Amino acid sequence: MEPSFLVLTDLSPRSQRAVYLTALLAAAANGQVILLHMENMPTLEPELGLVTIPEQYYRQERRDTLDALAALARHLPAPAIVESEAGNLHDVLGELIGRWQPQLLVMGLAAEHDLLDEMLMNQALPALRQTGLPLLLVPEETDVAQDPVLPLPRLVAVAADGEAFELADSSLAFRSVLESWSAQYSIVHIVTPQDPSDGGISKAEAAVRQSGLLPAEVKCTTYQIRSQPRSKGIVQAALDIQADMVVILARPRTLLTSIFNLGVSAEVVRISTVPVLLLPTTDRPKSALE
């Protein structure tokens, strides 16, 4: 079955930016895009003081939305299927993930993370914890001089802390997608002012190489920067090397907390101006020699 890439869209400019990037990734991998749109349900409790949306208006709005989604799908560089669903996002995601077996979930985020972002993530994360899917978060375009359509990644920054890890099964399956980009990679490592002068960049590179994330024949550069906090350093490193995307290796302990809670991954997502790809990992068991 061809690889599927599931992207949430509400037809806003920020979500369309995520949709087009998803389509580029799908086209490179000979895959397809699943456009997921969550329908607005009419309010039916006027006795509670809520504003009621007329059923006729709701039906027309749904037809208009489906027409717009179909038009969007026709103009993407990869085959696209529209899924317009009502209900709880967590339940809908679980059903669609089971049906399409996507390799990636993609979401567009506002420059100032708003209530909608938080609601989506709070509903999406339980499904991601259950499936362990890679998650791509695409920030809203904020620079008017910047191209609103993101290109296929050409240089990817892989943030590594030097700790050994193993890729989760979903991340192992995603390696073929990474290869389809024909991108260059740079392993970035952040040291704090209190860390030793050697910084540990060699350990970070060895951990990434040992994980099998990158093909053995792929040559990659390394980049180290001193920063406190580390999240700011990761974003600055990506800017310094002009990376198109940042890869965060999401360990099991970080997947148990919301992206909008405290943590390096959360802060990188908040302040990054380039897409952030969260790849699930498993903690590598220690050997008897360690």
Image: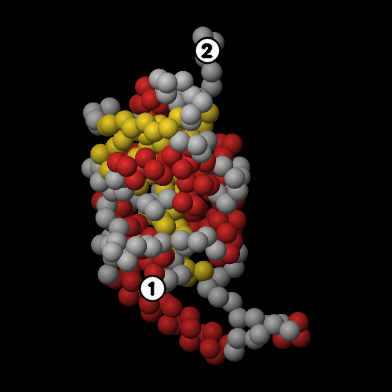
In the image, 217: left or right of 246?
A: left
Disc 2 versus disc 1: distance between alpha carbons?
Answer: 54 Å
Q: Quadrant of residue 246?
A: top left
Residue plotted at (39% across, 53% down):
273
Q: For mark 2, what is the residue?
A: 290
- Mark closer to the chain start, 2 or 1: 1
- Percent x, y for residue 13? 39, 69
- Percent x, y for residue 225? 39, 33
Q: How many marks?
A: 2
Identify the amino acid type marked 2.
Glu
Q: Nearer the viewer, residue 188 or 107?
A: 188
Is residue 98 depicted above or below 176 in this figure? Answer: below
* Residue 106 in sight in this render: no
The answer to the question of whether label 2 and label 1 lie on touching residues, with beta carbons closer than 8 A, is no
* Residue 182 in sight in this render: yes
* Camera-side mark, 2 or 1: 2
For the residue carrying disc 2, how many other residues have a C-alpha within 10 Å: few (<14), some (14-19), or many (20+)? few
Is residue 289 depicted above or below 142 in this figure? Answer: above
Identify the amino acid type marked 1.
Leu
- Percent x, y for residue 97? 49, 54
Residue plotted at (73% across, 84% down):
49
Residue closest to the far right: 47
Q: For mark 1, what is the residue?
A: 69
Is residue 279 depicted above or below 189 in this figure? Answer: below
Residue plotted at (46% across, 51% down):
271
Residue plotted at (43% across, 39% down):
233
Q: Nearer the viewer, residue 79 or 159?
A: 159
In the image, 198: left or right of 183?
A: right
| Label 2 residue SS | loop
